Image: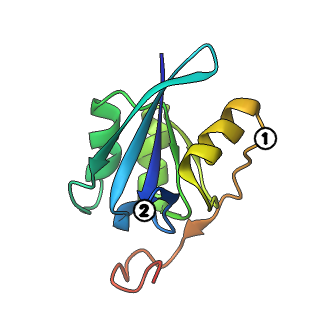
Amino acid sequence: MLKIAIASDNCNVAEHFGHCESFMIFNVENNKIIGSETIVNPGHKPGFLPDFLHDIGVNVIISGGMGGGAINIFKEKNIEFIVGISGDAKIAVEEYLYGSLKSTGLVCHEHKHHDECGE
């Protein structure tokens, strides 16, 4: 089973991974969504969320923007990350499954100014 997480705000892909309201988790088998759940964002602390998502078995993370620190941790844990995405979260997952969702590589370079990032 594949687990795809979307950093989300109101069922849409969130602009910034760490500051999202929640993570929509989609369970996929044979390229079809077989279930989903929403987990409230447990908090934005450097390095915490990538480990949290890894620990619940996420294979792919989709977001608007993401800091370089998070990207490095996802790379270390072999979790695919797709950034620069916006719009409806479920449609983003469907586009991923069809192979048409492309990462723009949008990285938030001002992450040290976390209060200003993504706002």
**Looking at this view, is 53 or 92 the one in front?**
92
Where does residue 33 sit, x and y in percent of width and height?
54, 26
Residue 103 versus residue 5: which sits nearer the camera?
5
Height in image: 42 above or below 55? below
Residue visible at 38% across and 63% down in the picture:
20
- x and y percentages locating residue 28 in the rendered image: 52, 23
Q: Secondary structure at mark 2?
A: loop
Residue at 33% x, 84% y: name it.
115
Q: Which circle marks residue 10 in the picture? A: 2
| Residue pictured at 48% horizontal, 63% vertical | 14
**Left or right of 36: which side holds 80?**
right
Q: Which residue is at 53% across, 58% downward? A: 13
Q: Give percent across and percent down for residue 51.
A: 29, 41
> Disc 1 vs disc 2: Cβ atoms closer than 8 Å?
no
The amino acid on which the numbered mark 2 sits, given as a three-letter code, is: Asn
Nearer to us in this view, 116 or 110: 116
Mark on residue 62?
A: none
Q: Where on the picture, by quarter, is residue 104?
A: bottom right
Residue carrying label 1: 100
Furthest-left residue in view? 42
